[in-house]
Image (cartoon, rainbow, N blue to C red):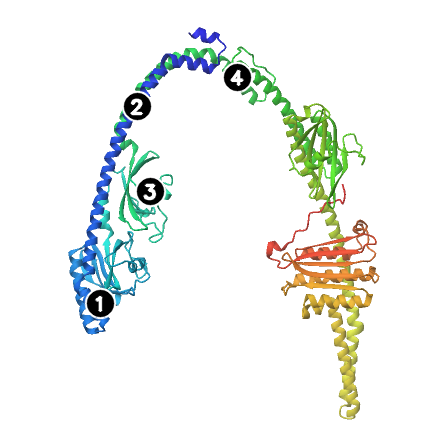
């Protein structure tokens, strides 16, 4: 049979399975599995039924005990002294009511002494106030002093008691007792029986019996076997009995630890808390559970007794049987293995050869080909392995080249050089006919493209893509994806390329046939596009940073010069103006002092002249201060200050002024106010120079949690590139820097003959969002 299988073109799996199944395993496994299943089912059923019976016996004991307590509380509701106390209280007989209250306390004391399981016996009137209460501590009953009686109107059991009809009984959950609103220490579990008290059909309070929780829990004495756990949980899954004391009383109304079967056994908790008897197996343990229904009216409440026992203990007979059967099965399998081993020897040679080939492949050896010695799956796998080794070698060579190109691209900071390297790499790695990079531009809603670089070196604007729709579709794809198309027996690929933060390009790759559509080629293109995009963005950022740094240097120089000039002018103003007035006032006052007694009339004229000089000096000082910081801004606020300078300058220049302000009574930081005022002042000054009587509009508004400023004139206008190249225009750069310093931005747009538009956006609160408003990302170029 072995020779027959070896000479036939069957798969290895078929040869091994036929031999093993035919000789040993089919009859042996079938018999063993059936016997194991039948005997195991019988033993398992007997063991689980025995555990169910024991748990049901405990549950029945608890239910009998709970039913006995109902008769006791009904007896107390008809206590003679209680009814006499209620009648005398209603009749207004205070002395008689006091006597019957004392008698009621004695009756409750006698009752509690006969029932040591009752921790508290109380009567609460219709307001929830405790009238009589007896506590039993360590088997001794005592009447609680009336000074320690409490009002329990807020407690849930009193609220439930007020809903009861005559003769009805309410049984509370088993929970921890509270005194004066706090959990009693040490912890004291109780269950409360409540019944209503009616006289002449009118509700007159409730009788409450607090039953010792430990009396109920004693029915759940621990199992003598340390591996068996006996648990009790309420209908919400919180533990009432657990070997670990830290897990007991975890409900929100008790210790609120959250320990519950939902947390420890989330997969089987719904079954345990279903209110039905059952059993489940979980993580090597068997959980047997049965409910104790102690409160039937809605919402129903019940406890669940749970016995957790290791499977190997509960099902010990079954395990012994399975061990014996398993040993027999192992012996049979060993015999089958010995018979199969000789057969397997005929097939392991090619497999070992493949293993050695894989080891060489992991060490970087791709040249040696494995010999093909059979025509079955092993032989086919060997052929596929040899082909894979050749492909891996070609792929690794291309990846090495791609890595080198990536390093080379990242070292360039010129856009044209990077684009040329991208094209050169594509032509080197892929069998392509033509490579062209199209830069996309937006003109309103219309999209246009322009040749940014080409593999032929020509960048003629007349060059068009083969598939314009695919070009625009690829521009919306994420960087790293490739769009493949076929056109007139040519393979065409389109890949998006980010050339700056706000501008995209698309690379058009034209091949022949389907060769360029190979998935590996697409992967190479996507990797190259990602590297090229990063390099182009870095180049764009580098150019913008260099330009900004140069602007800042020029601005600092200009600001220092302007600051020194301003100081010099202030000094001249003080020396030539303010000081002269003050010196003249001093001389007049000196002459006034000399003539005050000799010629009062002349002295009076000198005094008035000196006062005029002082007033002139004050005006001169205010003029100097106004030049350094606008006092209107401090006195009247931003809106009034802007209105004042705009109106004043419009009157001087003869503008038609359009002024719109909607600041919504928002308090702006001083830094924001002064920056906004100076930006508007500089924009109006430029308009005064160049608008030549044309209309000027100024708008301030609170929009999108920021202060928006727009100053628009219809003057001469200018070319932005020419102004950017001329660093003598400090005012334009200063407006942008003022906005940037307070966390905003300022953009200036202009064209010759179309005036100038200054747009600024400043934050309302410097601490919000880090104090910065982000401007739209701008390209370092205005075109492709």
**Residue located at (71% from left, 47% from top):** 778
Q: Secondary structure at mark 3?
A: loop
Whole-number angstrom distance, CA of label 1 to CA of label 4: 100 Å
Q: Earlier in the sequence, mark 3 or mark 4?
A: 3
User: Disc 2 designates what residue?
Assistant: 36
Q: Residue 421, position in %: x, y?
A: 73, 32
The disc placed on residue 354 is 4
Which residue is farthest front?
201
**Front tag of 1 and 4:** 1
Q: Which residue position holds label 1?
A: 86
- In the picture provided, is 758 more to the left or to the right than 363? right
Confirm or deny contact between disc 3 and disc 4 (CB under 8 A). no
Specify few, some or many for label 3: CA neighbours under 10 Å numbering under 14, 14-19, or 20 or more.
few
Classify 10 Å Cα crowding around label 2: few (below 14), some (14-19), many (20 and above): some
Q: Nearer the viewer's eye, disc 1 or disc 2?
A: 1
Q: CA distance from mark 1 to mark 2?
A: 73 Å
Name the element at disc 2. helix
Q: Mark 3 = which residue?
A: 274
Residue 294 appears at what percent x and percent y?
Answer: 26, 48
Question: Residue 122, located in which quarter of the rendered image?
Answer: bottom left
119 to the left or right of 568: left
Between label 3 and label 4, give the one nearer the viewer: 3
Instruction: Estimate the spatial distance between the alpha carbons at disc 1 and disc 3, rounded to whole Å.
Output: 44 Å
Disc 4 element = helix
Q: Measuring from the top left, give residue 690's x and y in whole percent.
A: 83, 59
Q: In the rendered view, would you say 274 is above or below 741?
A: above
Q: Residues within 10 Å of mark 1 (few under 14, many from 20)?
A: many
């Amino acid at each position: 049979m072995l020779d027959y299988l070896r000479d036939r073109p069957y798969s290895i799996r078929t040869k091994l399975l036929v031999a093993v199944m035919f000789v040993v395993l089919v009859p042996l496994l079938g018999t063993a599995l059936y016997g194991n299943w039948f005997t195991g089912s019988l033993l398992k059923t007997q063991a689980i039924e025995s555990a169910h019976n024991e748990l049901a016996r405990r549950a029945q004991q608890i239910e009998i005990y709970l039913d006995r307590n109902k008769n006791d509380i009904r007896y107390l509701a008809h206590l003679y002294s209680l009814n006499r106390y209620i009648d005398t209280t209603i009749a207004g007989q205070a002395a008689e009511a006091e006597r019957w209250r004392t008698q009621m306390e004695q009756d409750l004391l006698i009752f509690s002494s006969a029932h040591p399981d009752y921790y508290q016996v109380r009567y609460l009137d219709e307001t929830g106030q405790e009238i009589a209460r007896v506590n039993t501590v360590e088997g001794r009953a005592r009447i609680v002093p009336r000074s320690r009686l409490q009002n329990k109107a807020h407690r849930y059991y009193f609220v439930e008691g007020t809903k009861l009809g005559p003769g009805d009984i309410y049984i509370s959950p088993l929970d921890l007792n509270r005194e004066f609103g706090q959990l009693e220490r040490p912890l004291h579990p109780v269950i409360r029986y409540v019944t209503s008290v009616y006289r002449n059909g009118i509700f007159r309070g409730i009788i409450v019996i607090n039953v010792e929780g430990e009396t109920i829990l004693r029915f759940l004495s621990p199992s003598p076997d340390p591996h068996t756990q006996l648990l009790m949980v309420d209908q919400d899954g919180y533990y009432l009995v657990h070997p670990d004391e830290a897990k007991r009383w975890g409900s929100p109304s008790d210790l609120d630890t959250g320990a519950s079967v939902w947390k420890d056994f989330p997969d089987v908790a719904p079954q345990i808390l279903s209110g039905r008897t059952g059993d489940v197996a979980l993580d090597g343990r068997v959980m047997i559970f049965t409910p104790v229904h102690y409160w039937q009216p809605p919402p129903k409440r019940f406890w669940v007794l749970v016995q957790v026992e290791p499977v190997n203990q509960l099902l010990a007979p079954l395990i012994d049987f399975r061990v014996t059967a398993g040993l027999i099965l192992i012996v049979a399998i060993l015999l089958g293995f010995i018979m199969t081993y000789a057969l397997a020897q005929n097939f392991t040679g090619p497999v070992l050869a493949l293993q050695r080939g894989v080891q060489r492949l992991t060490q970087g050896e791709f040249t040696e080909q494995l010999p093909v010695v059979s025509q079955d799956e092993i032989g086919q796998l060997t052929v596929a392995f040899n082909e894979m080794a050749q492909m891996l070698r070609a792929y690794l060579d291309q990846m090495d080249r791609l890595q080198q190109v990536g390093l080379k691209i990242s070292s360039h900071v010129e856009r044209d050089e990077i684009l040329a390297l991208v094209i050169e790499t594509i032509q080197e790695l892929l069998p392509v006919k033509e490579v062209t990079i199209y830069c996309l531009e937006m003109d309103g809603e219309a999209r246009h493209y322009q040749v940014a670089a080409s593999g032929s070196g020509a960048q003629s604007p007349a060059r068009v893509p083969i598939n314009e729709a695919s070009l625009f579709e690829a521009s919306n794809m994420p960087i790293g994806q490739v769009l493949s198309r076929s056109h007139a027996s040519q393979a065409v690929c389109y890949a998006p390329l980010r050339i700056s933060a706000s501008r995209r390009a698309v690379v058009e790759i034209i091949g022949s046939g389907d060769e360029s559509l190979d998935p590996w080629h697409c992967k190479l293109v996507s990797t190259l596009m990602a590297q090229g995009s990063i390099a182009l963005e870095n180049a764009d950022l580098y150019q913008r940073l260099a330009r900004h740094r140069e602007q800042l240097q020029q601005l600092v120089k200009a600001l220092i010069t302007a600051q020194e000039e301003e100081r010099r002018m202030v000094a001249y103003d003080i020396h030539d103006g303010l000081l002269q007035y003050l010196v003249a006032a001093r001389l007049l006052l000196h002459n006034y002092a000399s003539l005050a007694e000799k010629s009062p009339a002349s002295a009076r004229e000198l005094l008035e002249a000196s006062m005029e000089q002082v007033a002139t000096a004050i005006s001169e000082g205010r003029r100097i201060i106004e030049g350094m910081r606008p006092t209107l801004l401090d006195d009247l606020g931003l809106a009034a200050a802007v209105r004042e300078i705009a109106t004043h300058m419009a009157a001087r220049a003869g503008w038609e002024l359009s002024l719109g302000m909607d600041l919504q009574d928002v308090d702006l930081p001083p830094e924001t106010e002064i920056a906004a005022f100076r930006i508007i002042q500089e924009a109006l000054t430029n308009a005064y120079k160049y608008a030549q009587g044309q209309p000027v509009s100024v708008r301030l508004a609170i929009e999108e949690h920021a202060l928006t400023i727009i100053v628009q004139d219809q003057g001469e206008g200018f070319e932005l590139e020419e102004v950017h190249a001329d660093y003598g225009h400090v005012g334009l750069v200063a407006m942008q820097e003022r906005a940037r310093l307070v966390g905003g931005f300022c953009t200036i747009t202009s064209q010759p003959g179309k005036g100038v538009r200054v747009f600024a956006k400043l934050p309302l609160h410097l601490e919000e969002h880090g104090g910065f408003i982000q401007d739209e990302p701008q390209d370092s170029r205005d075109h492709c």
